[in-house]
Amino acid sequence: MKPLDGVRVLEVAMYGFVPSAGGVLADWGAEVIKIEHAVTGDPQRGLKQTGNLKVGDGPNPNIWHANRGKRSLGLDMSRPEGKEILDELVRRADVFLTSFLPRSRQKLGIDVEDIRKLNPQVIYARGSALGPRGPESDKGGFDMTAFWSRASSAASITPSGHEGITPPPGPAYGDTISGTNLAGGIAAALFRRERTGEPSVVDVSLLGSGLWAMGQTISLSMLLDEPLQAPAAGAHGSPSNPLSGLYRTSDGRFLSLVMLQPGRYWPDVVRHIDRPELADDPRFSSAEQIAAHTAEAVEILREAFAARTLAEWTERLGTLSGPWAPVQDSLQVSGDPQIRANEYLLSAGDLELVSSPVQFDVQAPELGPAPDFAAQTEEILLELGLDWERIIELKTAGAVT
């Protein structure tokens, strides 16, 4: 049994952020019905290319990532007949999940008060760009604007002197992080309702999630009254710790070392690079001496690591006590045996997808495929008790697809 078995989620949302919350809830066992516009569907379905990555016809990770395991109902909520269908689904739902802006929610009759009239016990969950309060609460946005740019990630990662700003590393980067936050908030609200009988309104924004991701840095900046400056392109890493930074291997790959106690780990590192005499070198005899001679240590390590391939270092550093990792791109991760051992990549029908990060009882979730547009419309309407004659009438009226 999955943690959210029996929980019904009604999702009225588009693009990546809020649907990814629904995808996480589906991973956890919830039944998620995705409402899509009867004609246009979720606009995310039209996203076919990101950078050099382009998909053709068939399963599209841009829609499957956030929508695995759901059922899709094509519905025109602006028509009275369509609104009737939505209202009946609301009455049966535990969670109403939406990304619609305040004006659209009010116009369509799906704001908190409207939904609570139909189902006083429903958890009402909203995902927004900039939060539910303040002068810009009615504005939309995407992860590039609200999460990445406005919440300081972009400026913090862009080296000084670089023209422009560094973009997010991939599509739906801030969306997926924010969606997981929203799924966690919904789970907490379900727990509270189970304990107290009180339903909650749950709010998560891209802006708030972006700030949370940068929280430690932002607090440091406010304390010291200065922003974080990104290191120059090609820099080693820490200016006072040679064991916290990047090193190139002979085959052009990189190792990432993060050993925040260099005095503790230095003897072990130099043994692994076949330079045991450096353990007794006065320049590196303590953390203070290592900090003072960081530049010299970095050059020694650069020369050593450049002598072997990443595969050779992976085997050789298997017994290293300090934390390190290979730097991997978005394709190389698929061959990582540790990732495979933990089932962080899973089959979902015709595609492999990244699993949502929470596992229960050391078990990976079972992922279902994303639904085709409106694929379960008839199935869902039949479950509501409608007969075929009424379903045909709704289709003819354009209320459902």
Image (spheres, helix red, strand yellow):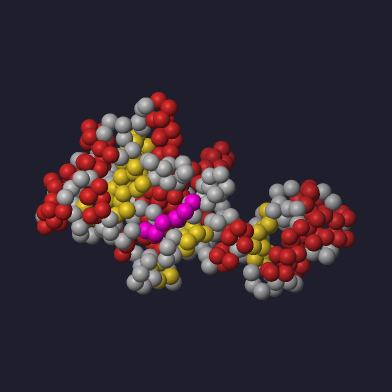
Residue at the limit of the structure toward the top, as seen here? 196
| Percent x, y of residue 109 | 20, 40
Residue 160 falls within the magenta-colored stretch: no
Quarter of the image where one finds residue 348: bottom left
Q: Nearer the viewer, residue 168 or 61?
A: 61
- Residue drawn at x 40%, y 49% is 26
Is residue 202 something that shows in the picture? Answer: yes
Residue 369 falls within the magenta-colored stretch: yes
- Residue drawn at x 25%, y 37% is 91
| Percent x, y of residue 49 | 38, 68
Q: Nearer the viewer, residue 38 or 307?
A: 38
| Percent x, y of residue 164 | 45, 62
Residue interval drawn in magenta: 365-370
| Percent x, y of residue 119 | 26, 34
- Residue drawn at x 54%, y 59% is 159
Chief secondary structure of the magenta portion: loop
Rendered view: 170 above or below 264: below
Q: Nearer the viewer, residue 75 or 43?
A: 75
- Residue drawn at x 34%, y 44% is 9
